[in-house]
Every structure is written in C-alpha cells, then in structure tokens.
Image (spheres, rainbow, N blue to C red):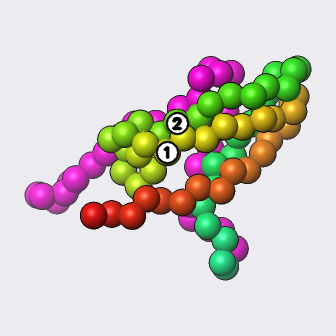
C-alpha cells in the first residue's frame, strides 16, 4: 500500500434480519443506471426489515432503507452515494 493511502474495510450495509443476503452493485451498471443494493431473502417466508449503513461508512454512511422481500426472492433498491464535503 502506498504511503498516505486510506483503507476502509467493513460492511457497507447491515440488515436487522441476519438471514438476508445483501449485495452492493456499483460498477458494471448499464449506462445511466446508478448503484443499487440487492436484497435477497433465502427464507421460506416473506419479510420486512430495516437496512442501515453505519455512520462511518464512506459514501453511504448513515443511509437508512426498508425492504419488503417475498420468500426466495430478491429486490433491488436504488442507493445514492452521499455528497462529500
């Protein structure tokens, strides 16, 4: 790592339901499409849950979302990076 580099490691988003699988998609999107958070429910029952990005997380810190996902399905939630000061 180069001197003066900054590295951040951690979970960008967290869900109160530990069974839920989260995938943040930022790169490789079609032209004109912004980042999204894919929320996958591997369980046999639908759920409604809160999703948060810890306050210290770069770009998405402090963001709060809710998701309702049918059983064995995924939904994509649009997310926008916060403006940097």
Q: Position of residue 36 (x, y in %)?
A: 64, 55
Queried whether the magenta region covers residue 37, the answer comes back as: no
Count of all numbered marks drawn on residues in the image:
2
Instruction: Give, as a single range, the part of the protein colored magenta.
Output: 1-30
Q: Position of residue 13 (x, y in %)?
A: 52, 39
Question: In the rendered structure, are the residues bearing label 2 and label 1 in contact, judged by CB atoms less than 8 Å apart?
Answer: yes
Q: Which residue is mark 1?
A: 63
Q: Is residue 61 left or right of residue 72?
A: left
Queried whether the magenta region covers residue 7, the answer comes back as: yes
Q: Residue lying farthest left? A: 3
**SS assignment for the magenta stretch, majority:** loop
Classify residue 41 by image quadrant.
top right
19, 67: nearer the viewer: 67
Q: Residue lying farthest bottom? A: 31
Viewport quadrant of the C terminus: bottom left
Give the numbered dot on residue 21. Answer: none
Tell me which residue sits at (47%, 59%) in the image. Answer: 81
Q: Residues within 10 Å of mark 2 (few under 14, many from 20)?
A: some
Q: Is 37 drawn above or below residue 22 in the view shown?
A: below
5, 45: nearer the viewer: 45
Viewport quadrant of the N terminus: bottom left
Q: Is 53 drawn above or below residue 6 in the view shown?
A: above
* Element carrying mark 2: strand
Q: Position of residue 84 (x, y in %)?
A: 33, 63
Q: Which residue is mark 2?
A: 52
Classify residue 64 by image quadrant.
top right
Tell me which residue sits at (49%, 45%) in the image. Answer: 63
Residue 35 in view in this figure: yes
Distance from disc 2 to disc 1, alpha carbons, whole Å, reads 6 Å
Residue 13 in view in this figure: no
């Amino acid at each position: 790592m180069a001197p003066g580099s900054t590295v951040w490691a951690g979970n960008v988003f967290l869900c109160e339901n530990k069974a839920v699988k989260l995938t943040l998609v930022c790169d490789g999107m079609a032209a004109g499409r912004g980042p999204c958070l894919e929320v996958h429910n591997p369980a046999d029952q639908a759920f409604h849950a809160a999703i948060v990005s810890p306050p210290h997380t770069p770009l998405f810190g402090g963001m709060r979302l809710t998701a309702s996902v049918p059983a064995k399905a995924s939904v994509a939630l649009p997310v926008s990076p916060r403006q940097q000061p």
